[in-house]
Amino acid sequence: MSALVEFNNVTYTYARSTKPAIEDISFSIEPGEFVALIGPSGAGKSTLCYCFNGSIPQLFNGSMSGNLNIAGCDPFEDDIPVLAQHVGLVVQNARTQLFNVTVIQEVGFGCENLGLPRPVILERVKQALDFVGLSGLEEREPTALSGGQQQRLAIACVLAMDPEILVLDEPTSELDPIGAEQVMDVIARMNQELGKTILLVTHDMEFVTKYASRVMLLNDRRLIMDGTPQEIFSKVELLAQSRIRPPQVCEVAEGLRQLGYRLDPLPVTLDDMVQSLKVLRHG
Ligand SMILES: Nc1ncnc2c1ncn2[C@@H]1O[C@H](COP(=O)(O)OP(=O)(O)O)[C@@H](O)[C@H]1O
Ligand SMILES: [Mg+2]
């Protein structure tokens, strides 16, 4: 059985660019994983996201090599509406791209493009709005919603198409802390309750340790680390080279390690840290 997502030696160069935006990327993702994709600006994170739904190579005029399997589809060959049934991509700044007059039309738009029957569309729209906590706002204008509501609306739009995989590119970067938590709660529940496979691009390392079971680090167009949060956040020097600051808990834990305290595995959340310290104390 092959993995749900496979990238094999994928390299992509935008039209008129002299060097690739992502280079020789290989990894696979199993169903139900929650993967965080981290890395500095310009590393190639958004480019990688566009490979999931066929936007790259089909909508951008660049050059691509390698091969890909996205839920049994080939983004080189299969049409974008076919891919959209397997992968929902919430692009960076998605909320600035809402264009319908009402919330209900916005969420129904993708399903209409799939040619689904009207009663099915209405049911899916209802369920998606309910799931993201926007029930009751069906007739509101998307642009009149708060930033966090708009981001949850953008998620509902792809969720209504019922894909196995959701790719979310910096969905919380422009939100206040409460709005960001609400969006992260929706993403976590899509994984835990609906069994969706998640690829989340984020600069928020606290969210990474709280929600992700695996972290991929992209720097200077290459995938340079791929592992559990414990593995990734203990590589302090590599992270610093990628201009990534680990969660504060990890920094404290690394400091304690250097003083000779045996913290293994590295605690990455506050709860882990409290547990580790209890064990150390009682020995
Ligand atoms: N549409 C585009 N055309 C040409 N170059 C692009 C385009 N989009 C991004 N790039 C370049 O590709 C590289 C990776 O960008 P991007 O994938 O947006 O990185 P990230 O999302 O990690 O910030 C950067 O050097 C960026 O300037
Ligand atoms: Mg980006």
Image: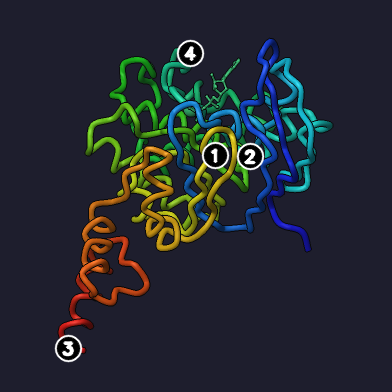
Residue 167 placement (x, y as % from top left):
54, 39
Whether residues under marks 3 and 2 lie with C-beta atoms below 8 angstroms apart, the answer is no
Secondary structure under the numbered disc 1 in the rendered image = strand
Q: Quadrant of ligand 1?
A: top right
Whether residues under marks 1 and 4 lie with C-beta atoms below 8 angstroms apart, the answer is no
Q: Which residue is mark 3?
A: 282
Q: Amino acid at mark 3?
A: His
Q: Which residue is mark 4?
A: 99
Is 155 in front, or is 169? 169
Whether residues under marks 2 and 1 lie with C-beta atoms below 8 angstroms apart, the answer is yes
Q: Quadrant of the N terminus?
A: bottom right
Q: Which residue is mark 2?
A: 87
Q: Could you tell which of marks 1 and 4 lies nearer the N-terminus?
A: 4
Q: CA distance from mark 3 to mark 2?
A: 48 Å
Q: Amino acid at mark 4?
A: Phe
Residue in view at x 29 percent, y 30 percent: 175
Q: Could you tell which of marks 3 and 1 lies nearer the N-terminus?
A: 1
Crowd rating for badge 1 (residues with CA inside 10 Å; few <14, some 14–19, many 20+): many
